[in-house]
Image (cartoon, rainbow, N blue to C red):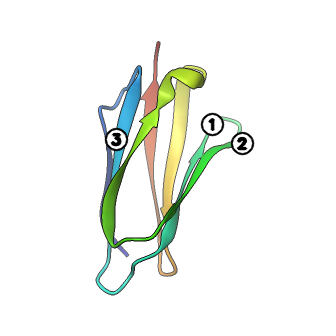
Amino acid sequence: MLQKFFTFPNPASNWTAIYYELSDGLKSGTIEITNSIGNIVKSLSISNQKGEFIWDTRSVEPGVYIISCKSSKSVTTTKLTIYH
């Protein structure tokens, strides 16, 4: 189970920070960002219990993206809106 998982700013234009904190004892997982038709546009391996990742959103089309944080015990998702 994830204790914390969010993006800021949301909506975003140039970048967004993705913050995560995994449950006690977990130190690995994956963050996946998918576009509105389900294609993975970014995948990142997590190797710490908590951290942040800055995503440069200027290279993707405006729209709604789904960000998933996956660990061996859970999957948590959030939506991110990108505009330029």
Residue at image coords 51%, 55%: 68
Image location (x, y in percent) of residue 37 = 71, 37
> What is the crowding at mark 2: few (fewer than 14 residues within 10 Å), some, or many (at least 20)?
few
| Kind of residue indicated by mark 2 | Asn
63 shown above or below 26 = above
The mark lying in front, picked from 3 and 1, is 3
Q: Are marks 3 and 1 in contact (CB under 8 Å)?
A: no
Name the one closer to the observer, 68 or 31.
31
Residue at image coords 45%, 41%: 79
Q: Which badge, 3 or 2, comes first in the chain's sequence? A: 3
Residue most extreme to the top: 84
Q: Residue 39 has which mark?
A: 2
Q: What residue does disc 1 label?
A: 35
48 shown above or below 66 = below
Image location (x, y in percent) of residue 18 = 37, 47
Residue 21 visible: no
Q: What residue does disc 3 label?
A: 17
Q: Do the residues labelled 2 and 1 touch (CB within 8 Å)?
A: yes
Image location (x, y in percent) of residue 49 = 33, 73
Q: Is residue 55 left or right of residue 6?
A: right
